[in-house]
Image (cartoon, grey):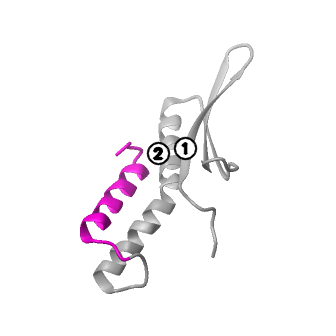
Amino acid sequence: MESTPGPWFVHHVKVVERPVRITEHFAVRPLNGPTFAFLPAGRAEAAVNIQARNACAIAALPDLMAACEAALNGLYGVPGPDLSDHKTREMLCSALAKAKGSST
């Protein structure tokens, strides 16, 4: 099954509706590509935080898949990228950080 090629990014969008309503949304899309996941967050801070975390988890999917394939290849010889243990660990840590909304 094919999917939109990664990497995917989260774009924070604020929509200002006159006179004073501001709503927040999160769009997930590849660089220079169309949005394929749109998460409306509304105005409540808790909802905004939850949708931000959801958007980060969705955007990290291609990275998580590549890191899992590399880990499986290293552990069990499953076909996939042939990477060193250090590179595989780096990929896993980076993908998890992205899924959690961290920059590293």
* Mark toward the viewer: 2 or 1: 1
Residue 64 in picture, x, y percent from top left: 43, 63
Residue 55 in picture, x, y percent from top left: 53, 47
How many marks on residues? 2
In the image, 82 versus 36, the foreground residue is 82
Q: Residue at x 63, y 76 (%)?
A: 1
In the image, 32 versus 10, the foreground residue is 32
In the image, 94 versus 12, the foreground residue is 94
Taking the view exactly as shown, the residue that stands out farthest to the left is 86
What is the three-letter code of the residue carrying label 2? Arg
Q: Which residues are magenta?
A: 82-104
Q: Residue at x 33, y 72 (%)?
A: 83
| Residue 72 position (above or below residue 55) | below
Taking the view exactly as shown, the residue that stands out farthest to the top is 19
What is the three-letter code of the residue carrying label 1? Val
Quick one: label 2 or label 1, which is nearer the N terminus?
A: 1
Indicate which disc residue 22 carries: none
Q: Which residue is mark 1?
A: 10
Q: Which residue is mark 2?
A: 53
Q: Residue at x 34, y 86 (%)?
A: 77
